[in-house]
Amino acid sequence: MPQEPRIDVETRAHGIESSLSAEQVERIAEALGHQGVWFAAPPERSGQARPPEQVWELVGDSPHHGRLATGRAAVHLAEGHDALTRPLILADGFNYGPSDLDELWRHFNKPYAPGKPGFLDQLSTLGIDVILLGFDQRHIAIQANAAVAVTAVQRAIDERWGDDQLVVGGVSMGGLITRYALARMENERIDHQTEKYFSYDSPHLGAWIPLVLQQLAYLHEALDPRSDGPGQAELIRSPAAQQQLWGWVQNADYSGPVTDNALRQEWIEDLRRVGWFPMRPYKLGMANGTGHGVGNGLPAGTPVFDLNLDALQLVARFQPDMGELQNIGTVRFGAPVWTSATSHVPAFDGAPGGTLDAWGRLADAMGLTIEPRFRSSCFVPAVSAVALARDPYQWQSDLHLDLSDLPKDETQLDAFCCDTTDTEHSAVSAPLIEWFLEQLAGW
């Protein structure tokens, strides 16, 4: 039986302010830098967003735990269309607060190869109407925003001219939202009239944010609370983050299992209740990670930060590979103030997958120079993005599985494509977009 992955804080941060002088507390807070964006993709500001022909204000079709989610959709009609005819719904992913649908357009329509139009422009040329689906609170429970997706699907069916079937999916968490929405509609015998479902680097089995970076976000919040809105700790604490992360810690002092938080358990149980995946659509998946099973070369357990400022020392390491009580982080003023270690947690940072430059962003905030190759680590493992047919709690032993000749019964998808190199999570890359366009050609 596999050992339970866990974390143990050997020297506690609780009461850190009372055990240190005000100057020492300030030194640690300053060393951790400004609480900027560490754990979410920065917005795409370059390029122009095409104005939509319509904007739909949407309310979820049902509440989740008494909460009714809201959102909106930007409808971009294809060339030569005067009305919605061949709808493709693309749902936004995870971050804090409301979706920016102009930013979503810019992201997916920026040039990915010389001489090639943007992806969304190519869809328009193919006669496909693009509906960009956003949410007013991206950080709330996935089930709540899935109700908004259900409303969007029903609105598209109601406003569509003709009887062409829909294509429905999303990027990152948007793929999970639409997966649940379509499966729930089938479970409730609601006709979603969807021919194809797609996910773009979605964490079907879970995502990874280094446990030590989660802890440092909490520690930073305790020492230097933000007054200008939610910080990184609030993002990690959000329901959607808890549901998606394979490993999650609730505060800087937490000791215990990292894979069994209550919100993730409920999310997985709800997925199973509605059928796990929608059965009727042909299911497509794209992974920003490679499929050959070879990792990115990040050395497990190696210090990424090893800051020494007079008496202050701050160390944070890439996740060690398994073992017991493997140190991942230390803060000390002479004697340790806070130390943390993991047991039976694999080296996720070095796995093939879509990457996130959380280490680099924190280094920038701290004013540290680190090796360029250390800036980014695995965020959505490739085996998660292709929905490997594994228990969502016990799949970590397959992080380096070769997906190139994967038997069809080893994935929940009907077809998938992996990138040729590990690229940034949700990045628009030529291999993925060209493959997706081929899959849509016969629709």
Image (cartoon, rainbow, N blue to C red):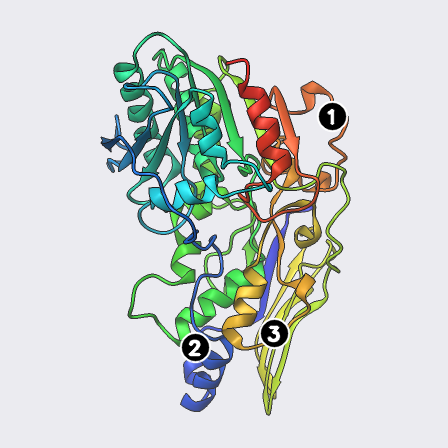
Task: Give the image location of residue 57, x and y in percent.
Answer: 22, 33
Cα–Cα span, label 3 and label 1: 41 Å
Q: Amino acid at mark 3?
A: Thr
Pointer 1 or 2: first along the chain: 2
Cα–Cα span, label 3 and label 2: 16 Å
Pointer 3 or 1: first along the chain: 3
Checking the image for residue 64, the label placed there is: none
Pick whichever, 212 or 324, lies toward us.
Answer: 212
Q: Nearer the viewer, mark 3 or mark 2?
A: 3
| Position above or below: 42 against 220 | above
Pointer 3 or 2: first along the chain: 2
| Residue at 38%, 75% in the rendered image | 224
Pick whichever, 64 or 203, lies toward us.
Answer: 203
The image quarter containing residue 403 is top right
Pointer 2 local density, CA inside 10 Å: few below 14, some 14–19, many at least 20: few
Task: Give the image location of residue 202, x and y in percent.
Answer: 53, 37
Task: Tell me if label 3 and label 1 are in contact, CB under 8 Å.
Answer: no
Checking the image for residue 406, the label placed there is: 1
Task: Give the image location of residue 233, x and y in percent.
Answer: 42, 61
At mark 1, the secondary structure is: loop
Q: Amino acid at mark 2?
A: Gly
Task: Tell me if label 1 and label 2 are in contact, CB under 8 Å.
Answer: no
Pointer 3 local density, CA inside 10 Å: few below 14, some 14–19, many at least 20: many
Cα–Cα span, label 1 and label 2: 51 Å
Q: Nearer the viewer, mark 1 or mark 2?
A: 1
Checking the image for residue 330, the label placed there is: 3
Checking the image for residue 15, the label placed there is: 2
Q: Amino acid at mark 1?
A: Leu
Task: Give the image location of residue 186, x and y in percent.
Answer: 40, 15
The image quarter containing residue 18 is bottom left
| Residue at 40%, 40% in the rendered image | 105
Pointer 1 local density, CA inside 10 Å: few below 14, some 14–19, many at least 20: few
